[in-house]
Image (cartoon, rainbow, N blue to C red):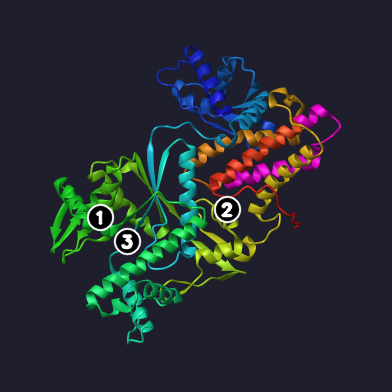
Amino acid sequence: MIEDRLSELIRTALVAAGDELGLEGDLPEVELSKPRQKEHGDLATNVALVLAKRVGKAPREVAETLIRHLPDAPFVASAEVAGPGFVNFRLTTGWLEDALREVVDAGSTYGRAAPNGRRVQVEFVSANPTGPLHVGHARNAALGDALARLFEAAGWTVEREYYFNDTGGQMDRFGSSVEARYLQLLGREAEVPEDGYRGAYVVDLAREILEAEGPGLADLPPPERFERLREEGAKRVLVQIDHTLERFGVRFDSYLSERSLAERGEIEAAVERLRAAGTVYESEGAVWFRSTDFGDDKDRPLVRSNGSHTYFGADCAYLVDKFDRGFDLVVYVWGADHHGTIARVRGAAEALGYGGDRAEFVIYQWVSFLREGLPLPMSKRAGTFVTLDELMDEVGTDAARFHLLMFGTDAAMSFDIETVKRQSLDNPVYYVQYGHARIASILRKAAGTGIALRPIAEADLSLLRTEAELDVLRAIADVPAQIAAAAEFRAPHRLTHAAQELAARFHRFYTECPVLSDDEELTQARLWLCTGAKQAIANLLGLLGVSAPESMERADG
């Protein structure tokens, strides 16, 4: 990346200017940013402002000294002091031509880092198997999957895991609801519990079980019948969830149930590890974790007075299970209602000896799903909700994922179905995809008219000198930095903006610069510009889990 090359140049200048500045000790971190106004240059650094107090000189004096010691570099056209002490750099177009050659050479790997030898687990969705995934799960699924893709792009080996609670009150109410519907289908007297699940999907589950297992389950002893029907219902829900997620472009490498942790004795073992660490005490017959020692607002129970484990007790066992599998980092993707859980889980990771910084929590705000401005119903127990499958049926997977990833995790967002499904150029995902499809059309037209694309090494890329062409090149060259920043800050929304910006610059280029012309050399250069832009858009969309179509019907609006 050009940022790396320029940072190294600045570090070389700092070393050369060390005696003159009186600089001792380690060099400061070189930070680069883009000036808000293009006329102020391509990149700027505040390193002189950072150093000024340390060396006892005015920031502008430090900046001027730094510039005097900058080595010559073919990619730097000029450097100047700006404002209180920034150093603004104007770059030559040569590095942009290099970036175009790089994207063509790297193809689908453009913007991806080399393997770093580290392993990360991303755990997301993790909805309990009490019914179909609904729109309330959509942001978690899109965000978790995009984060996993970004970790892979940053060089990590990634495991995607789905952890589900198949014990406890929710599952008992679900099991009782399935049992009641199963018995009703056999003409027997049964009522869904008042706090049970009443959606039509429960009837469908009961019917599937009846068809697969026959009526014999009804004659089992009630406790055994309940256990079997709860298990059969949950198993079928998990199959449905897996199909829905696959359709949403999400795959999981592993599934883990809370019940399995308990059955293997891992919850009890985790509690004993915490006890040995001196972070557990007993009170009123329950076992408590001293989570206040780790910044929590109160201590949390691990085992209830009746001997059953709490959700947090299972969370501790799950931490042990994760790190015993050799992950360097574990990432939880949680909704805003889990914010209060972070301190206790991070504290448990520290108490268990793993270090709190190896457990990371990505918390996202809620989505308000609307239809023409009116809120959608959202109650799984009442059976009044819109499933994720229904959302995909209506707006499409690409539109759903792109829109769900357009905002940072700390921003609440609205998702109006009627707006998102609109296939027009004012729809961001359609706008970006149409840019990709338009480029594909140009390349097909060129091939159809007999224009053979020569190797890029033979193309005179210096002919790309209009501002519209250079803007496309700048956006292409910026893709690796955008991907790296999106991965570092766990911010997939940066890629939606980068994709929109690249598409916008290409659309402008297309209107101002005819790609196919009588000038054979310019045509070759512009065809390679199109090729590079097409690949860069596809790579950005791919990290969002959004397709890059080769053709689309033109939409006006």
Give the magenta-colored segment's residue range. 496-524
Could you tell me residue 169's position as x and y percent?
Answer: 29, 69
How crowded pointer 1 is (Cα within 10 Å; few <14, some 14-19, many 20+) is rated as some
Q: Would you place residue 494 above or below residue 105 in this image?
A: below
Q: Nearer the viewer, residue 451 or 361?
A: 451
> Which image quarter: residue 414?
bottom right
| Of the image marks 3 and 1, the number of the one nearer the N terminus | 3
Q: Main secondary structure of the magenta part?
A: helix
Q: Which amino acid lies under the numbered mark 1 shown in the image of this protein?
A: Leu
> Which image quarter: residue 128?
bottom left
Q: CA distance from mark 2 to mark 3?
A: 29 Å
Could you tell me residue 301's position as x and y percent?
Answer: 22, 59
Label ID, residue 261 = 1
Q: Would you place residue 468 above or below residue 260 in this image?
A: above
Q: Which amino acid lies under the numbered mark 3 shown in the image of this protein?
A: Asn
| Of the image marks 2 and 1, the number of the one nearer the N terminus | 1
Q: Which amino acid lies under the numbered mark 2 shown in the image of this protein?
A: Phe
Could you tell me if residue 164 is visible in this image?
yes
Indicate the quadrant containing the N terminus: top left, top right, bottom left or bottom right: top right
Residue at 80% x, 27% y: name it.
Answer: 521
Residue at 23% x, 49% y: name it.
Answer: 293
Q: Which residue is mark 2?
A: 402
Q: Which residue is mark 3?
A: 165
